Amino acid sequence: MKPLDPRLLRYARSTRGFVVLAIGLGIVMAILVIIQARLLATAIVDVAQGRATLATSVPILIALTATIAIRAIVSWIAEAAAYRTSAKAKAELRAAAMDHVLRLGPYGPAGTDPGGVASLLTRGVDALDTYFARYLPQLFLALIVPAAIIATVIGFDLVSAIIIAVTLPIIVVFMILIGLYTRSRVDRQWQTLARLSGHFLDLVAGLPTLKVLGRAKKQAQAIEDIGDRYRSTTMGVLRISFLSSFALELLASLSVALVAVTIGVRLVEGGIAFSTALFVLILAPEAYLPLRMVGQHFHAAAEGLGAADEVFTILEIPLPSQGSESTIPQPLGLRCVDVTVTYPDRDSPALFPTTVDISPGSVTALIGTSGGGKSTFLAALLGFVAPTGGVITVRDAEVKNQQSFGQPDIDLRLIDPDLWRARVAWVPQSPQLVAPWAGDRPTVLDVVRLGRPDATSDEVRSALAQAGVLAEIEAMPEGMATQITEGGVGLSAGQVRRLALARAMLRKADLLLLDEPTAALDGVSEAAVVQAIRAAADSGVAVVVVAHRPALIDIADVIVHVSAPLLQQDLTLNPGEDLINAERAVAKFARTNITDTGW
């Protein structure tokens, strides 16, 4: 946890101007502190030695009052600039982090820990106010003011300057030690808060299901337990803050007392003039004050520093490779050769070598046990994750021999991801009904039309009919104008899934990726969805579907068993079987072996 993280200057550009301003104001403040001490010492000495009269004291008092007023104005300017910079820096960090999270896709932080990311970019980033308004200005004062005071005191009393110069680093060492100890506590606090946020988000999303199963009260107890841990962790950080402030105050007081004792002894012995002694004695506490304030504000800003560090961690996650190729074959096909995916935080591959040709007008079914890599394979086709082995190429589906004629295959990693995804429609395992804008609740028409904003109402109705949900929508009081929430509250899980399928159908994409599209559907709805998938393929769309049900496997033209090598060894086919018999054998294998998915 660095006092001034260089990454803050890089990602929040408005911080750079504030740093320059803070340094300039720090120099002005140091000069004012010295002038104020000198004026105060002169006034007191003149009164003590009887040289002062009302007339002679007025100019000094006016100058002293003006100095104090200017110090107040400089402090106000610094604080106002700090809050203004804080607002800009927070907006820049949020924008940069949100853009990066969206570019990382659903397999980035937002997909793995949405509650933690939401908490970090809201409450966490807001905690930077104290960092900018209190801690950062004091940090520059702590660098400038003590150095200016020591340089000034050297010209008046070398002994006091040496004492101040020796005791200041001791306070700095204690601050570093306390900061290192605090960091682990703050990290633990953020981890607990992220866990609490994620658990609460998952609980709200699954509350209807938990209520039906009678598990809601138990989850409430779990949230209460995590909340208690967060409370105790926060109180631990506050305890450290109060104890460290006491320790720094004690050290500063002892250091000032040491300067005062040495000055007092030499003053009695006549080794130092009274005016010099008083000036140094007034100036000495000002050397320690910025350090004490830095220590005090450090703990108040620790939460913001910890959040900023988490934001920087997200911003430094490398993005998937971004290609620039804009020419995509039409009609397009895909050739996947030994495609393997291994995530950075895992030792074993999430997707073992998979080879398949995907052609327009065909349905490719991915089967296999849960966790075998089917969803990861779809993520690779979308460009959300880059293959760590093998290659995915896009080809002209009408070209049979690429070596003889036609456009050569194009590595998917070289294609502009935005252009590529414009040709793809995707329905994930847990689809979300996202509104096209923020504000009012969207209607069914708005949610489905997000797939193709220029679609007409008749085209939306046709897509709903294809997904087998039109009759249920028209049965609602307001039909397609019925307002729904982004979470689909009020709709069944099957209706949400079919609305997402209708949105995908509306895109008229060249490649349709479906992850368990018939999950949570009854037999009638499943038959409608299967028919829609087959119709989409017959219209020339290349369909890739993760299949756990026989109805989907039965309409597949190509069946790919995606799993670890040990599981693939259980699948044996006779050499003399033709392609159709081989596909049936795979389907039969799937029906008899995938017992952990509710077959």
Image (spheres, grey):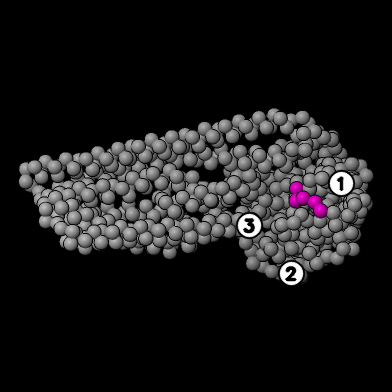
Three-letter code, disc 3: Arg
Q: Nearer the viewer, residue 78 or 95?
A: 78
Real-space Cα distance between discs 1 and 2? 33 Å
Q: Nearer the viewer, mark 1 or mark 3?
A: 3
The residue tagged 2 is 407
Prevalent SS, magenta region: loop
Q: Residue at x 55, y 40 (%)?
A: 191
Question: CB under 8 Å between callouts 1 and 2?
Answer: no
Residue 7 highlighted magenta (yes or no): no
The stretch in magenta equals 483-487
Helix, strand or loop at disc 1?
A: helix
Q: Nearer the viewer, residue 371 or 42?
A: 42
Q: Residue at x 90, y 46 (%)?
A: 525
Quarter of the figure with residue 460: bottom right
Real-space Cα distance between discs 1 and 3? 32 Å
Q: Is residue 437 above or below residue 373?
A: below
Question: Considering only order in the chain, which callout, 2 or 1, is on the residue closer to the N terminus?
Answer: 2
Identify the mark at residue 103; answer none if there is no mark: 3
Q: Residue at x 73, y 51 (%)?
A: 378
Q: Residues within 10 Å of mark 1 (few under 14, many from 20)?
A: many
Query: Percent position (x, y) of residue 22?
Result: 38, 60
Helix, strand or loop at disc 2?
A: loop
